[in-house]
Amino acid sequence: MTDLLHRILPGVQKPARYTGGEFNEIQKDPASVRVNVAFCFPDTYEIGMSNVGMRILYGVMNEMEGVWCQRVFHPWGDMEEAMRKHGLPLWALESQKPVKDFDMIAFTIGYEMAYTSIVNMLDLAGVPLYAKDRHDLSQMVFAGGVCTFNPEPLAPFFDFFSLGEGEESTVEIVSLYDRAKAEGWSREQFLLEVSKIEGVYVPGFYEHVYNDDGTLREIIAREGQPAVHTKRIIEDLDRAYYPTKMIVPSTEIVHDRTNIELFRGCIRGCRFCQAGYSCRPVRRKSAAVACQQAIESLEDSGANEITLSSLSTSDYRGLKELTDELIPYCERTHVNLSVPSLRADNFSRELMQKLQTGKKSGLTFAPEAGTQRLRDVINKNLTEEEILTTCENAFSGGWSNVKLYFMLGLPTETDEDVLGIADLVYKIILKWKEFGSAKKRGLRIHVATAFFVPKPHTPFQWEQQITMEEYLRRCKLLKSHFYSKSIDYNYHTPEISRLESVMARGDRRIAPVIAEAARRGARLDGWDEYFKHEAWIEAFKVCGVDPEFYTTRGFGEDELLPWDHINVGLTKKFLLRERHTAYESKVTPDCRHGCAGCGANCLLKEAKCDA
């Protein structure tokens, strides 16, 4: 296989995607390994190697004695073509061993449009697609990641799902497999035992029954199985495993830098944001530990940039303490320190000046909606005054490039709200004319609009998605009111957002559609150059599934939802209350101004929410 691979590599783009051998890659003596895990990321090397969660779990598993975790990524189109032409099966980077020869095949899934890539990777590996067709203890296929909070569209393909944060549960799962392999268990016996681990869901032990109108009537659990599965969380991030000896990529990746995670969860409660709700409760890493990890990572990797990451980094309580320690170190070592995920309401000029003493790069903010009424509907907790004051501070400090992200199709949105985006942008331009101190470069405002996708475990999980035609009408309406040459406007492809909505809120009837679309060439659907909408259209027709059932129809509040048996710590009572509050255009204060009673605190056994 290695000789064939070496003959193929000169003819494909970026051969380093497929060779392994990077600095800090984990190598083990195969003779000492009892359990081989193929850790698969359903996208390209550049995307997967930028994923912090994958790096964490790669390290966690390789810390285990007798376990070797190896990385697998989806090939680019030219490599896939060569693989199929020469009969080369999908392999792992560390050993070039075929994925089909591994004991366990794990996927991390963070984006719904990766579903066909999962199917395609199994096909490229020569692994049976459906769980029912895999019979012995080998080729145990499982997955984790935020998309598994509604695992049902993928349920027929996977033996089990690991729900929530995996630092502890992954060790328990792999250790159980080690025992099962040593004792010669059957596949059924292992699945019964692994289902007893908290946070593990075995879909084959559940039956879904539908009403005549297509809605879900009942989820029947096999005897001995719980009616609801609760996600796992890590309570103490200071003691949790975090790799400071990360693999240094051999080729450029999307986020080619060191990343330090500051906290998990979010205090804000934006009603459209799945991550903000499903990752609760808030747990914070201390500034001292974050600083130590940052310096160790930088010195080991030689990276010239470090990012402090979280869902809303400027909400990190220790941010001043941490940056006061890191900035002098970064200045001495010529390392660029970046702090993304900043909010306009607490973004200070002092912090901007500290972080960027040289060239002023662009500022990025996400007001999400153009009017205060609609920002209150989505609970953005951000006023126009705060946005404009932030821009005033930035412009007077030398910044001249602003990126603004909005959504179109949000619940209760009207044309007035759409045009409110244009109005807000022009108010920002006026601030530039008044306060800009770098006018030689000129102002650039990049405006992007996304197509709202209702997501599970949010107050908007029941909402209708507007049609693609209506979304494009609103995009055109907005564009027609952008008159300044300082504005660049882009909008997301509506076909992708429509499919994302189907996958996000789908049930088990979507699985054959995914398989059929993959058979027709769909894969890497998040890449414009590979997205094949026609393959999806034909797949829906062949499988007799109407995508509008999961998009424009919306869901009834009394309807059984495909993900109702997955508990991320939020009560349905809370989500419904937030939905009704949204329709009253009322805001719910963030967690620091009083607990809203979402229920996530119940997941904590020892500590309290660290909001």
Image (spheres, helix red, strand yellow):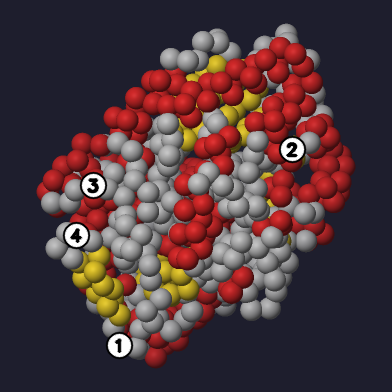
Q: Is residue 228 left or right of residue 438?
A: left
Residue on which disc 3 sits: 547
**Label 2 vs label 3: CA separation?**
41 Å
Q: Nearer the viewer, mark 1 or mark 4?
A: 4
Q: Residue at x 75, y 13 (%)?
A: 434
Task: Examine the rendered structure and indicate whether residue 299 appears above or below residue 218.
Answer: above
Q: Is residue 538 above or below residue 445?
A: below
Calculate the distance from the C-alpha at mark 3 to the C-alpha at mark 1.
33 Å
The first of marks 4 and 2 along the sequence is 4
Mark toward the start of the polypeptide (2 vs 1): 1
- Residue 345 % position (x, y): 71, 39
Mark 4 lies on residue: 214
Q: If you read the primary sequence from the N terminus, does the residue marked by circle 3 or circle 1 appear first?
A: 1
From the viewer's perspective, is residue 465 above or below residue 235? Answer: above
Q: Is residue 520 found left or right of 270 in the rendered image?
A: left
How far is the residue under mark 4 from the one under mark 2?
A: 48 Å
Q: CA distance from mark 3 to mark 4?
A: 12 Å
